Image: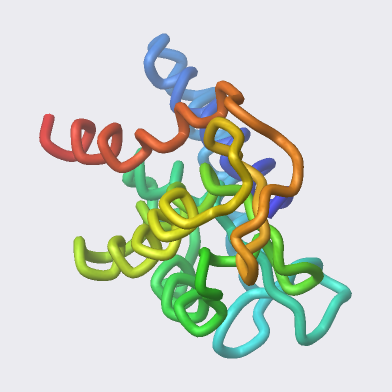
Amino acid sequence: NLSVKAIMGIAGYSEMAHMLGLDDVAEKYAGIAKKMAVKWEEMANEGDHYRLAFDRENTWSQKYNMIWDKMWDLNLFPNNVIDKEVSYYLTKQNPYGLPLDSRKEYTKSDWIIWTATMSPDQATFEKFINPLYKYINETTSRVPISDWHHTDSGEWVGFKARSVIGGYWMKVLLDKVLNN
């Protein structure tokens, strides 16, 4: 996911250059981001999903930073990477949400929503949101909404009432962008 974040950072730089009328700079960095995305797909490919890290077989992680590829309609990642990841994540859900990755059962709820927002339709989006709602509704940890919780027990891990909860609005932002 951090490699995806770097690729999206370069793509974002390209988009800003384009907005400033620096088309030669925009094209240069758009090309770099595209080449990196193709290389990432080759190196991370695990068949039905993509690895947590290039050298770690049989691992997975939420690639929530790919939301920016969808948001900006860049289509950087080849071979339907987003659709493949979303389908795979649905097989990894626990009662209180999708784990962050294959190492532990905890998650970040704002990133679940970023991941859910990559869904191809509302029904799939809700498959990610319903366990998160269940966590918020049923957790016995009585703190303001924690963005870091266990997906198997619904217990709070650490954070509470942080500004990252603003990430819960990612779907609203995407819908606004796509409808303009």
74 to 134, vertically: above or below: above
**Image location (x, y in percent) of residue 57:** 81, 84
- The foreground one among 37 and 180 is 180
- Hey, which residue is sitting farthest top in the picture? 20
Quarter of the figure with the N terminus: bottom right
Q: Which residue occupies 43% across, 64% down?
A: 131
| Occupied quadrant, residue 50 | bottom right
**Image location (x, y in percent) of residue 18:** 41, 21
**Image location (x, y in percent) of residue 78:** 47, 68
Q: Which residue occupies 66% across, 46% down?
A: 148
Q: How many marks?
A: 0
Quarter of the figure with the C terminus: top left
Asked whether residue 48 is in view, the answer is: yes
- The foreground one among 4 and 18 is 4
Q: Which residue occupies 59% across, 40% down?
A: 142
| Occupied quadrant, residue 8 | top right
| Occupied quadrant, residue 144 | top right
Q: Which residue occupies 51% across, 51% down?
A: 66
Asked whether residue 39 is in view, the answer is: no
- Hey, which residue is sitting farthest left in the picture? 179
Colour basis: rainbow
- The foreground one among 155 and 173 is 155
- Hey, which residue is sitting farthest bottom in the picture? 47
**Image location (x, y in percent) of residue 112:** 50, 54
| Left or right of 93, for residue 82 | left
| Left or right of 4, for residue 177 | left
